[in-house]
Image (tube, rainbow, N blue to C red):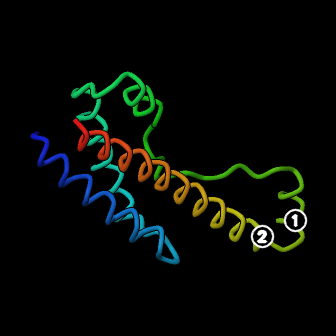
Amino acid sequence: MTINELHQHFVDLDFQASKMLKSSQIDSNYLSKYAHLAEIVKQKIVTLSISPEINEEVSKLGLIDISFEPKLSLLAHCENVLTFGYYKKSFQQKKREKYFRNEIQKRKLLFNYVEKQLKTI
C-alpha cells in the first residue's frame, strides 16, 4: 500500500465516520465495513512506523465489538422487571449507540492526526 492509497483510505474512513456519526442510528453493515477498513489502516500505520507515540496509540485501539451488549446493573434489572422488559431494550440500545459513536469518534480523531503527520513528512 502506497502513501497515496493510505491517504485515500483516510478520506474514505473520515467520510464513513462522519456519515455514521450524523445518522440517527448506526447501521451494522456500515459499521462492520468501517471496522474492517480501520483495521487494515491500523496495520499499515504500524508497519510504516511514523513515530513511537503514534504506534503506541494505534496499538491501544482494539477492534470495534460489533456484537457489544452492555451489562445491566441491579437497579436496571429491577426497572426491567417493573416495566416488563421495556427498560432493558431502550437501555441497551442507547448504550450500544453510545459505545459505537465513541469508538468511531476515537478512530476518526486518531486517523486525522496520523494523516496530518504524514502530510508533514
Q: What percent of the width, then of the height, locates residue 71?
A: 71, 49
Separation (CA) of disc 2 from disc 1 = 7 Å
Is there CB contact under 8 Å for labels 2 and 1?
A: yes
Q: Nearer the viewer, residue 81 or 16?
A: 16
Against 96, residue 64 (above or below) is: above
Circle 2 packing at 10 Å, graded few (<14), some (14-19), many (20+), is some
Left or right of 100 on screen, residue 20: left
The residue sitting at 52% across, 57% down in the picture is 100
The residue sitting at 35% across, 56% down in the picture is 32
**Residue, disc 2:** 87
Q: Amino acid at mark 1?
A: Glu
Specify which label sits upstream in the sequence, 2 or 1: 1
Against 93, residue 62 (above or below) is: above
Left or right of 104 on screen, residue 49: left
Q: Amino acid at mark 2?
A: Tyr
Circle 1 packing at 10 Å, graded few (<14), some (14-19), many (20+), is some
- Residue 64 — which label? none
Residue pushed farthest bottom? 24
**Residue, disc 1:** 79
Q: Nearer the viewer, residue 80 or 19?
A: 19
Q: What percent of the width, then of the height, locates residue 31?
A: 39, 60
What is the secondary structure assignment of the residue under circle 1?
helix
Q: What percent of the width, then of the height, locates residue 3?
A: 14, 42
Q: Nearer the viewer, residue 96 or 41?
A: 41
Residue pushed farthest top? 52
Q: How many marks?
A: 2
The residue sitting at 37% across, 27% down in the picture is 55
